[in-house]
Amino acid sequence: MPTLTLIQAVNDGLKVAMRQDESVLVFGEDVGPKGGVFLATEGLTAEFGKERCFDTPLSEDGIVGTAIGMAANGLRPVCEIQFQDFIFPAFDQIVSEAAKLRYRSGGQYTAPMVIRTPYGGGIRGGLYHSQSGEAYFTHTAGLKVVIPSTPYDAKGLLLASIADPDPVLFMEPKALYRHLKADVPEGHYTVDLSTLRQVREGDDVTVFCYGSMVPVVEKAANKAAEQGIHCQVVDLRTLLPLDEQGVLEAARKTGRVVVVHEAPRFCGYGAEISAIIAENIIEYMEAPIRRVTGFDTPFPNTLEHHYLPDERRVLDAIEEVAKY
Amino acid sequence: MPQLIQLIDPQGQVLGELPDLSADRLKELFVHMLRVRVTDGRMLTLQRAGRIGFVGTSTGMEASQIGSAAALQPQDWLWSGLREGGAAVMRGLPLSEYVAQMYCNANDTAKGRQMCNHFQHKGSHYPSWSSVIGTQIPHGVGAALASQRRGEDAVHAIYFGDGATSSNGFHSGMNFAAVWKVPAVFVCVNNGWAISVSAKQQTAAESYAHKASAYGMPAARVDGNDLLACYATMQAAVARARSGEGPSLVVLETYRMMGHSSSDDPSKYRDEAEVEHWRTRDPIARFEQYLLANQILEDGERATIEATLTAEIDRVIHEQESADPMALKTLVEDVYADVPNHLKRQYNDFIEVAERHGDAQPGDGAFPL
């Protein structure tokens, strides 16, 4: 079995989808012969031609808007927004159009499409190459929001997203693009959307995380284990629609919960996880729920390593919740 | 400024070569224009009576929508804005579905999810607009690319108003379409007003047609109250798109005789003299004159047609007054292809309360979980 980085797995997933289904098109800014600024689309134009993998004019609104029309008329567009920070000109098309087309037409028109976009910090990109905007989109009914954290999941979730009948925002943790290599099966396979991944078993504390925070949490959980605190680590991997029952089961098992994400805290995704737990199973909780997140500030540049939750901050929260 | 294309002037004088249409076809188009006017009148009455919530009329704009859309073939798509419902009816939207949409009742193919005046008809390739101005423009471009890739003989006519030329969608849609050379025709229906903002406040360009040259596509400016000029110009633009020569912009210069909608009072922002000036340019009266002069229409025939159309719409209204209650499950259906568990649980919580208060109908019960 080949070992691939996360971004190679994305690239492989795109190729598998394009070989399998002629209606899959890949387009965006610099995704053609250059292969994308992170090389996610490397080799696609060479293999599939410029009819199926092509550069667009520099307009996120245009990229997503035209993708919706293609999807409504029988194609399977997989468009790229170069950085998630650049997605906001397309916010209207995503929120008001793609996400609502099926609903507002009573199911007569649909937008099966994928918007791939790298998100998150860790590359010294400053305010506009580092943001984690998932919460803007998880508030949008009709949209699916998927964030992989491993090469295996990146390919399997991407293939599931491309096959999905609804629009999917596929957010790729750019900090993990070349973080490690792992086994990725050749050819086609899918990882079901709206399923959780048990990263690690443990009976003392449950830590929910996703994307780039998963390896950070794993490290913190290893450190905690050295002190005898055994963490159950859950990778949410589809934020919308969320496997709520899976989250509640995992939280009930330990009664002690930490939620970790790099996005700002206020109205962040961790607030929803906390609220679901509080609303449904507060009587099982042995400790207050702790969130470890980015600050409620714009994303910094020089101090980004302090903005991003790290192993120390996550471990601190685990310890606090464990001993409460 | 590109010269205004006019084939019949407001006095009914023929100025240029008319498109080759049979007498029957000409009369058909006249009936379609009248149906738009009669339907608008009936919808306004219903709105004032509190039976429906909102009407955006096309009064004064009948030639622009009927003339231009008549140049499309059945396989072509029409991407609509607020006021193309009459064109949709002409192309196949059943009047019953039109009225059901205005009532937003259980017969509405969109299941009452959108407010009035947001028609759709899949059979004639007519998706509904969203209310957000200009967003349908890039959709039409993407869909045109899809048609082109499949080698289909379909042209995508993308309609929008003068206000939409200031939107993101106009810019990105026009730009992408020209770069990709897709089979699309952009139809700007310049009716002078975007709610209360005049066309002069919308752009400093001499005309909307000027905008096309920046995107590298040709444009035509048409007297939008001249049915045959709208038809002929649109036909040429559609033929150009169909033959693979790429997109173009057609600007139809017309006038919105009534308010933006039934909720708008235009006397607050525009001069009655302007409205009066346009009243003398009425598109239906102009075409009627031509038909009478050429013995295609007989004296008094318009009144007979109008009476027939009124009876037709009244019958449909009567039918749509009594529709089944909307199924409550439509609250959570069609958000995704399948209703996800969290929506099933939200619905089940809701229906328990609704049932307790006697609001639920058979079939409205909880989802099995």
Image (cartoon, coloured by chain):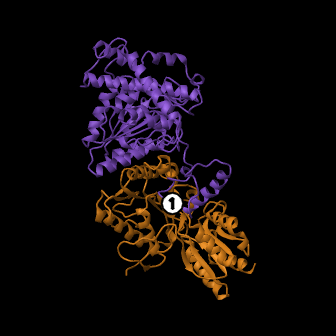
Chain colours: A orange, B purple
Chain letter of disc 1 in the image: A
Q: Is residue A210 above or below residue A297?
A: below
Q: Does B131 sit left or right of B217 as displayed?
A: right
Q: Quadrant of residue B122?
A: top left
Closer to the camera in the image, B208 or A2: A2
Image point (39%, 23%), residue name: B225
**Secondary structure under the numbered disc 1 in the rendered image:** strand
On the picture, is B75 further left or further right than A199? left
The image position of residue B42, as x and y in percent, is: 50, 25
Which quadrant would residue A38 be assigned to in this image? Answer: bottom left
The answer to which quarter of the image holds residue B217 is top left
Point out the image quarter for the C terminus of chain A: bottom right
Residue B115: tell me if it is visible: yes
Q: Residue at x 39, y 17 (%)?
A: B304
Q: Position of residue B28 (x, y in %)?
A: 32, 25
In-front residue for pair B103/B125: B103
Q: Which residue is at the far front? A: B362
Q: Amino acid at mark 1?
A: Lys
Rendering coords of residue A151 (x, y %): 45, 74
**Residue linked to disc 1:** A144
